[in-house]
Amino acid sequence: SELPDEWTNRTLRPISGITLTPAFRGESLIRSEPIHLLFARDRGLRDGDWKIVSFKSEPWELYNVAEDRTELNDLATKHPELAATMIEKWTEKSF
């Protein structure tokens, strides 16, 4: 079949990941790498119970999602070393 004109010049990059099948079965996912997120100017990294996010390229926020599922308590100033380490991990992946 013919591809639309806007698709013919697109460059696809390979991505890596893990299967989500265990999660669909209600089992735990075992990851050796954190989950990197990027959507437009929104960025994020989930590593274990910790998550950093930056909406619209604003300053990073840090949450412990095991204790704060609704992400109401930004812990970036309370745990600056952890935030810096996670920001570095996100930056190393550099989408």
Image: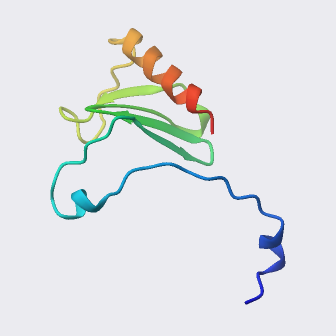
Q: Measured from the top left, where is residue 21 in percent x and y?
A: 27, 62
Q: Nearer the viewer, residue 73 or 54?
A: 54
Count of labels shown? Answer: 0
* Vertical comparison of 24 with 3: above or below: above
Residue 4 in the figure: left or right of residue 43: right
For the point 34% across and 12% down, the residue is 79
Residue projecting furthest to the bottom: 1
46 in relation to 16, above or below: above
Left or right of 94 on screen, residue 75: left
- Residue at 19% x, 35% y is 66
> Observer-nearest residue: 15 or 74?
15
Q: In this figure, which colouring scheme has been used for the structure? A: rainbow
Q: Is residue 41 left or right of residue 43?
A: right
Quarter of the picture containing the N terminus is bottom right
Q: Residue at x 44, y 49 (%)?
A: 17
In the image, residue 73 sits, relative to residue 22, either above or below, namely above
**Quadrant position of the C terminus in the picture:** top right
On the picture, is 19 further left or further right than 6?
Answer: left
Q: Position of residue 12 (x, y in %)?
A: 69, 58
Question: Height in image: 76 above or below 69?
Answer: above
Residue 47 in percent (x, y) is at 34, 32
Measuring from the top left, give residue 80's x and y in whole percent. Answer: 40, 11
In this view, the residue in front, 11 or 37, is: 11
Q: Residue 92, located in which quarter of the rendered image?
A: top right
Image point 53% across, 38% down: which residue? 43
